[in-house]
Image: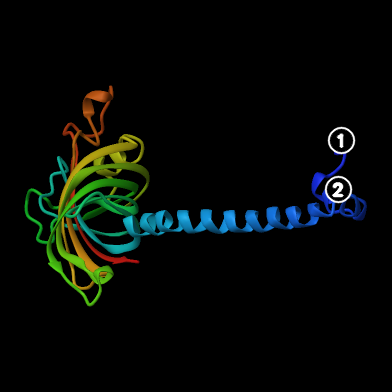
């Protein structure tokens, strides 16, 4: 065939072909124009789908504080302050329902009571550092309407879900004791927690989140060790107060 081994587009546009087949020039130009129109039509067709996906997903940043305690450490109350920061991706599921996934750096832990007594004579502070991935379902309420439909937002939402956290380091302050020994090699690396919370948005972009997180299983179990440093099992729970900015 006369096209064999050659670029067909260049061959069809060569002078010899144009002279022998004068209509080829018109056909060739029509094909090129049709390709441009086809590309434009495809772009116009997929653009609404792309914009719809953009409207369906939102992302944001999170920064806040935590207050934690551990059942079994002989210290009651959410005495341990910490930091929480990370990212959130939100997907719209329906008119009032959303789903979200977050990637957080979260500080948990335990601390002696501010006012010590005979049961808690020692002063200590244990900071546990986690990478946390909460997955939540949100129910929205109190619609605020803007000048345009794209400016509408829900002021309040209630959320519940599960959170996976990976323990990677700790910091202990105080006299060495069994609590420090637990943190140094006896804590479980993986933690699964239940969480419930609520969000309040002042604007479409900025809001506050209050969240309660409680471990499903023990973060430290003395039955897992032949010579445990502490006889009591540990179960962690904490409160998060976060500022959220959604783009």
The image position of residue 41, as x and y in percent, is: 52, 56
Packing grade of label 1 (10 A; few <14, some 14-19, many >=20) is few
Residue corresponding to mark 1: 4
Q: Quadrant of residue 59?
A: bottom left
The crowding category of the residue bearing disc 2, from other C-alpha atoms within 10 Å (few below 14, some 14 to 19, many at least 20), is some
Nearer the N terminus, badge 2 or badge 1? Answer: 1
> Is residue 16 found left or right of 139 in the rendered image?
right
The residue drawn where x is 69% and y is 56% is 30
From the viewer's side, name the closer residue of 78 and 4: 4
Q: Could you say where residue 46 lies in the image, as x and y percent from the top left? A: 46, 54
Tag 2 residue: 11
Q: What residue occupies the far right of the structure in this picture?
A: 16
Q: Is residue 52 left or right of residue 114?
A: right
- Confirm whether residue 202 shows in the render: yes
Identified at 31% across, 43% down, the residue is 165
Identify the residue at horizontal 80%, vertical 52% (top origin): 24
- What label does residue 109 carry, if any? none
Residue found at x 17% / y 54%: 96
Residue in the foreground of this view, choosing between 97 and 34? 34
SS under mark 1: loop
Whether residue 69 is visible to the viewer of this picture, yes or no, is no
Q: Are marks 2 and 1 in contact (CB under 8 Å)?
A: no
243 and 58: which one is in front?
A: 58
The residues tagged by marks 2 and 1 sit, at their Cα atoms, a distance apart of 10 Å
Q: Where's residue 136, x and y in %?
A: 23, 47
Residue 141 x, y percent position in the rendering: 11, 60
Quarter placement of the C terminus: bottom left
> Is residue 244 depicted above or below 238 in this figure?
below
Mark 2: which secondary structure? Answer: helix
The number of callouts visible is 2
Q: Quadrant of residue 150?
A: bottom left
Placement of the N terminus among the 4 image quadrants: top right
């Amino acid at each position: 065939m006369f096209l064999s081994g050659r670029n067909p587009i260049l061959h069809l546009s060569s002078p010899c072909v144009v002279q022998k087949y004068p209509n080829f020039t018109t056909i060739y130009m029509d094909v090129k124009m049709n390709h441009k129109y086809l590309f434009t039509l495809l772009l116009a067709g997929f653009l609404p789908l792309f914009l719809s996906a953009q409207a369906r997903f939102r992302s944001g940043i999170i920064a806040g504080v935590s207050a934690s305690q551990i059942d079994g450490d002989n210290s009651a109350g959410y005495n341990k302050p910490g930091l929480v920061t990370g990212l959130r991706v939100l997907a719209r599921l329906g008119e009032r329902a959303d789903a979200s996934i977050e990637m957080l750096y979260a500080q948990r832990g335990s601390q002696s009571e501010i006012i010590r007594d005979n049961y808690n004579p020692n002063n200590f502070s244990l900071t546990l550092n986690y990478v946390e991935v909460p997955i939540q379902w949100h129910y929205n309420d109190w619609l605020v309407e803007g000048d345009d439909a794209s400016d509408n937002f829900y002021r309040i939402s209630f959320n519940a879900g599960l959170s996976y956290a990976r323990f990677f380091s700790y910091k202990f302050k105080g006299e060495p004791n069994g609590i420090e020994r637990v943190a140094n090699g006896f804590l479980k690396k993986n933690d699964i927690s239940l969480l419930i919370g609520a969000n309040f948005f002042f604007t479409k972009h900025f809001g506050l989140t209050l969240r309660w997180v409680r471990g499903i299983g023990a973060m430290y179990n003395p039955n897992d060790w032949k010579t445990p440093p502490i006889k009591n099992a540990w179960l962690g729970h904490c409160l998060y107060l976060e500022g959220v900015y959604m783009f």
